[in-house]
Image (cartoon, helix red, strand yellow):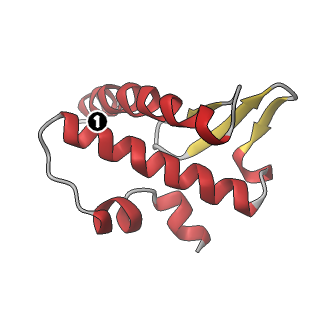
Amino acid sequence: MAKELKETKDLLIKPISDALQSYLPILFPGTVLNLADDFCMKEVKRNAGIEPYSQLSMGTREQLAIILRLALADVLVENGMPVTVVEVVLYFHRCFFHIL
């Protein structure tokens, strides 16, 4: 079961990360956001170096969380799944949800 779970996560993380990287230059030019295996935001790579997600300002975290939700919506829609705003905004990113 653990092997299947890892394979499923691997299949999802790359498309979400790719979609995410297409949104980042809009707000954060030259930035790369890395996701952990549990889909939580792990770190941000910028010109100044690598910053852990936990050390980012609350405003930056909120902006990244919105971008992440948009990326997830893109991946779901590309795979023929219906998406509502409520699902994307409220339920996707459990790490951010705990902060609220």
**For the view shown, which residue lies furthest in the right direction?**
48
Q: Where is mark 1, residue-wise?
A: 5
Task: Name which residue lies at 55% across and 69% down.
Answer: 98
**Does 56 sit left or right of 87 as displayed?**
right
Density class for disc 1 (Cα within 10 Å; few <14, some 14-19, many ≥20) is: few
Nearer-the-camera pick, 25 or 50: 25
Nearer-the-camera pick, 53 or 66: 66
Would you place residue 31 above or below residue 73 in this image? above
**Does 93 sit left or right of 43 as displayed?**
left
**For the view shown, which residue lies furthest in the bottom direction?**
100
Task: Name which residue lies at 28% across and 35% down.
Answer: 5
Q: Position of residue 47 (x, y in %)?
A: 83, 25
> The C terminus is located in which quarter?
bottom right
Task: Name which residue lies at 46% across and 60% down.
Answer: 94
Would you place residue 44 above or below residue 11 in this image? below
Q: Position of residue 27 (x, y in %)?
A: 65, 42
The disc labelled 1 sits on which kind of residue?
A: Leu
Would you place residue 36 above or below residue 48 in this image? below
Q: Position of residue 28 (x, y in %)?
A: 68, 38
**Does 92 sit left or right of 95 as displayed?**
left
* Badge count: 1
Q: Position of residue 1 (x, y in %)?
A: 23, 36
Q: Secondary structure at mark 1?
A: helix
Would you place residue 87 above or below residue 4 in this image? below
**Does 81 sit left or right of 91 as displayed?**
left
